[in-house]
Amino acid sequence: MSLTEQYFQTDDLDPIDIVEHLAEYHDWEFDRVAEDQIAMMVQGQWRNYSLTLAWAPQDETLRLICTFEMEPPQDRLQSIYEVLNGANDNVWAGAFTYWAEPRLMVYRYGLVLAGGQIASPEQIDRMIAAAVGAAERFYPAFQLVGWGGRTPDEALQVAIAEAYGRA
């Protein structure tokens, strides 16, 4: 049974209702912050990621923000920004940014649902998976640049390299 068949049985669900059902389906810890916003914790291989999804009806956009703490040494910030730009060149759905004030690495994505379109549970599930996947893929590169003394190009090779075979 698809996620749509299981959870999408009425036309009056807004995207945050769907996200709440997905969080329950995946057994993610979540908090319905407001009628149009939900916050979740999703466990990855490298760390836990904080995700916030918000529905903005005025521009018909479902906004996703995936964050994780990152407190690189001040003298490594320029390299962090360089590896961040390299990461953005390698992701198609969304983009990374670094918020210096709260010291958070952020992955952002907006799903535009103009013209009264309705997001399916599969679309939203894929959006969340893409955010966590990108964070997981580039987390080692951010770490190598911030604390491992690697250049952005060296660090990105770790994230971009394809693994072959099985362990």
Image (cartoon, rainbow, N blue to C red):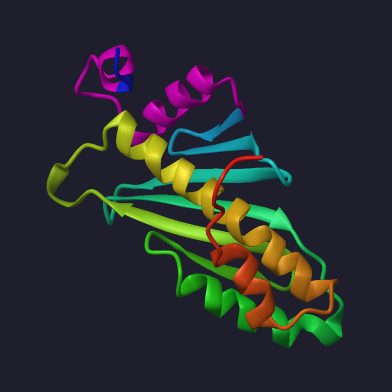
Q: Is residue 39 left or right of residue 103?
A: left
Q: Is residue 49 above or below residue 13?
A: below
Residue 32's spot in the image, x, y percent?
55, 30
Residue 40's spot in the image, x, y percent?
60, 35
Question: From which residue to which does the magenta span run?
Answer: 4-29
Q: Is residue 14 something that shows in the picture?
A: no
Q: Residue at x 34, y 35 (%)?
A: 15
Front residue of 83/32: it is 83
Q: In this figure, what is the number of numbered marks?
A: 0
Q: Residue at x 71, y 87 (%)?
A: 78
Q: Residue at x 37, y 27 (%)?
A: 18
Residue 69's spot in the image, x, y percent?
76, 57
Instruction: Look at the image and say whether residue 65 sits in the magenta stretch.
Output: no
Front residue of 87/69: it is 87
Q: Residue furthest left?
A: 115
Q: Is residue 83 above or below residue 70?
A: below
Instruction: Look at the image and say whether residue 9 sits in the magenta stretch.
Output: yes
Q: Is residue 37 something that shows in the picture?
A: yes
